[in-house]
Image (cartoon, coloured by chain):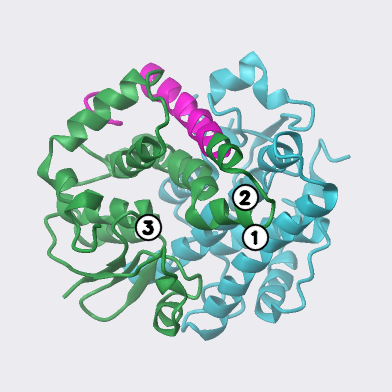
Chain colours: A green, B cyan
Amino acid sequence: MTTLYGYYRSSAAYRVRIVLNLKGLAYDQVPVDLVKGGQRSEESLARNPQGLVPVLETDDGVQLTQSLAICEYLEECHPTPPLLPADPAGRARVRALAQLIACEMHPLNNLRVLRYLVDELGASDAAKLAWYRHWIAEGFSALEAQLSRAAGSGDFCHGDCPTLADACLVPQVFNAERFDCDLGDYPRIQYIVANCRALPAFEQAAPAAQPDAR
Amino acid sequence: MTTLYGYYRSSAAYRVRIVLNLKGLAYDQVPVDLVKGGQRSEESLARNPQGLVPVLETDDGVQLTQSLAICEYLEECHPTPPLLPADPAGRARVRALAQLIACEMHPLNNLRVLRYLVDELGASDAAKLAWYRHWIAEGFSALEAQLSRAAGSGDFCHGDCPTLADACLVPQVFNAERFDCDLGDYPRIQYIVANCRALPAFEQAAPAAQPDAR
């Protein structure tokens, strides 16, 4: 059985849940409580020395780390329905949109980073929130521009079917909403996210639907 | 002609240069001076609304963003020599190693982030340097553990030929050296980087060898 070690509110785990659901793959979930430091247990570090979730354990016992690497693995092993387009330029566009979120936005607003700001740099709550919203605004402004102008966007980030980019976008919007970020300037993003959320694969991957949700 | 819009010291551009060189592909370079804000010019933002380098313009005029998406594109269009292994689990391992650097380390130590720490949070030079070294140590400790224990590592991050993971590792080590980070605890990383640097593809991609190097 495929097993996902995750956390209901981890947006990296959320991406993988969306992809597993879109592919129609069954999986067990083992929650790792990031707030209580579960990712630093001996067992968790043995799975991933980085002390991060998600980790996906495949049927044959291979343990995979890094959400986008896991999603690419699932795409290669279970190509239907495809979450990357067929043409190399389209694939590059989808990956770039996914990476705009996964490499430029999410890493800056991670729990461990917010903790460093407060514990080591003495940031106030207001300063922490300003940091959070700054990187959301930087990232979503650029993403909105790319989604609005580029040939390629449709009901979803790329065309009219969900791709890897949508699997990254929805968790990032969930996070932004949690921190009360104003998303009024991003109508294209909101349109696409509404279309995603109407699909069961996304709905069933949402944090509130997970066994460890509080 | 393929054109790379980059900056000699940008480690994301450095990754793409390594991959272009490993693939034996000819390319023009157009420097964008990040320190002088060249990435915010109208022309740069038209290429990439994120105001980041690198951008790769292909023979047929398509403009690609995000270094890892560009590398995957080059891998798909120019499969020889391969920079990802043939088996899905191996491919996932290489991508995870690359993403450990590209999604967990590099984004935190970017120029724009260091500037925010100083300008908005009032961080001292010492606090900025401590931040930098903290995320280098977090990332490289985990990477060293993954490279040391996992079946898969050899003279390079994965086996005995360079992969996408090495194309990410060498620029990250270059950055760490520039900030005088102590790398003594990472012998495996040092061994692999020395092997990479002995190859002309890596040597010719180094910042000092670029036309805009100062």
The chain holding disc 1 is: B
Residue B177 placement (x, y as % from top left)? 80, 61
Q: Nearer the viewer, mark 3 or mark 1?
A: 1
The chain holding disc 3 is: A
Is A137 covered by the magenta stretch?
yes
Tag 3: Cα neighbours inside 10 Å, few (<14), some, or many (≥20)?
many
Q: Are marks 2 and 3 on the same chain?
A: no
The structure residue drawn at horizontal position 59% and vertical position 30%, both measured from the top left corner, is: B1
Q: Please, what is the three-letter code of the amino acid marked with disc 3?
A: Ser
Q: Is residue A150 left or right of residue B97?
A: left
Residue B108's label in the rendered image is 2
| Disc 3 to disc 1, C-alpha distance | 19 Å
Residue A67's label in the rendered image is 3
* Nearest to N terminus: mark 2 or mark 1: 2
Q: Please, what is the three-letter code of the amino acid marked with disc 1?
A: Trp
* Pointers 2 and 1 in contact (C-beta within 8 Å): yes
Residue A7 placement (x, y as % from top left)? 32, 62
Residue A32 placement (x, y as % from top left)? 34, 70
Specify whether residue A62 is in view: yes
Residue B135's label in the rendered image is 1
Q: Tell me which corner region of the image, top left, top right, bottom left or bottom right, holds residue B93.
A: bottom left
| Disc 2 to disc 3, C-alpha distance | 18 Å
